[in-house]
Image (cartoon, rainbow, N blue to C red):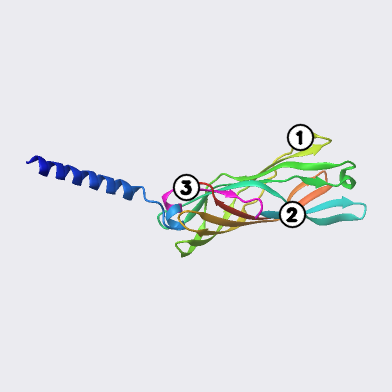
Amino acid sequence: MHNGATAMLARAFIFLALAACAHGTSDPDSVRDRLESDTTELSVSTGSSAGSLTAQRRTSDGWVAGEVALTVNSGQLVASADARGQIAIQHLEVELGPISIPKSVLGYEAQLTGIHLQADRPAGVVTTWTDDDEAHATAQLELALTWSLTIDGKTSPLGAPKMPAVPVELAFTGDGEAVHAEARVLSTGMFWSWADLVKLEDLHLSLAATTVNP
């Protein structure tokens, strides 16, 4: 084979190899493509996320209830999808701000601190795609709650309450470059009581999250 033909053949092989590599590393072009191609990590936006719960305290006249606003300090959502587009929540965690307990309840000022909710067990999600850039889903997540009681600057861990599976509604939007998620968490009923003086019920969370890795 002549040297010219050999060089031309070599250039053709190099071109094909580069084209194959470029095709194999192409960026995802939709939300669905991104979730199906790799595990996607999203960071919870503290400014766009909030929550509430109902707190009850015992008084001489019986139980008095009030709504407590929750501050979301940080959080993370990790999701993926299989080849059929069914989404799975691989990880969800939320760090909440402290909750004050009035002096009238315990006789001294106290706070629930280090409030951390986490779901590590992958949860299958019932998924409906409006198009490749919008999905709506529902799931049942088993959340683990850890927290502490702080009194006069001294902090003691509290026992982790057993919480039932929590229904979660999710919406994924965006494109292949950036994925946005909204998650609504609702746990109804009592999930913690202390010394028959304080009860916490009806946990509501509204979370907004965006991809951290482009």
Of 209 and 146, the residue lying toward us: 209
Inspect the magenta stretch and tell me whether residue 71 lies in it. Answer: no
Percent coordinates x, y for residue 160 in the rendering:
69, 41
Estimate the spatial distance between the alpha carbons at disc 2 and disc 1, rounded to whole Å.
22 Å
Residue in view at x 41 percent, y 50 percent: 37
Mark 3 crowdedness (10 Å alpha carbons): few <14, some 14-19, many ≥20: some
- Provide the residue designation for mark 3: 39
Say left or right for 122 vs 202.
left
Seen in the image, is 201 located left or right of residue 124? Answer: right
Going from the N terminus, do you reach mark 2 or mark 1 first? 2
**Nearest to viewer (mark 3 / mark 2):** 3
Which badge, 3 or 2, comes first in the chain's sequence? 3
Task: Give the percent coordinates (x, y) of residue 202.
Answer: 72, 56
Question: Can residue 94 be seen in this snapshot?
Answer: no
Q: Residues within 10 Å of mark 2 (few under 14, many from 20)?
A: many
- For the question of whether residue 131 can be seen, the reply is yes
Does the residue at mark 3 contact the one at mark 2 (Cβ under 8 Å)? no
The magenta stretch is 35-48
- SS assignment at label 3: loop
Q: Measured along the vertical axis of the image, is residue 46 above or below residue 154?
A: below
Identify the residue position indicated by label 1 in the image: 156
Mark 1 is on which residue type? Ser
- Front-most of residues 153 and 83: 153
Residue 173 in picture, x, y percent from top left? 52, 60
The outermost residue toward the front is 4
Residue that label 2 marks: 53
Query: Looking at the picture, which amino acid does disc 3 mark?
Result: Thr
Indicate left or right for 118 with 99 as reference. left
Q: Amino acid at mark 2?
A: Leu
Q: What residue lies at 72% left-to-right and 39% top-to-bottom?
A: 159
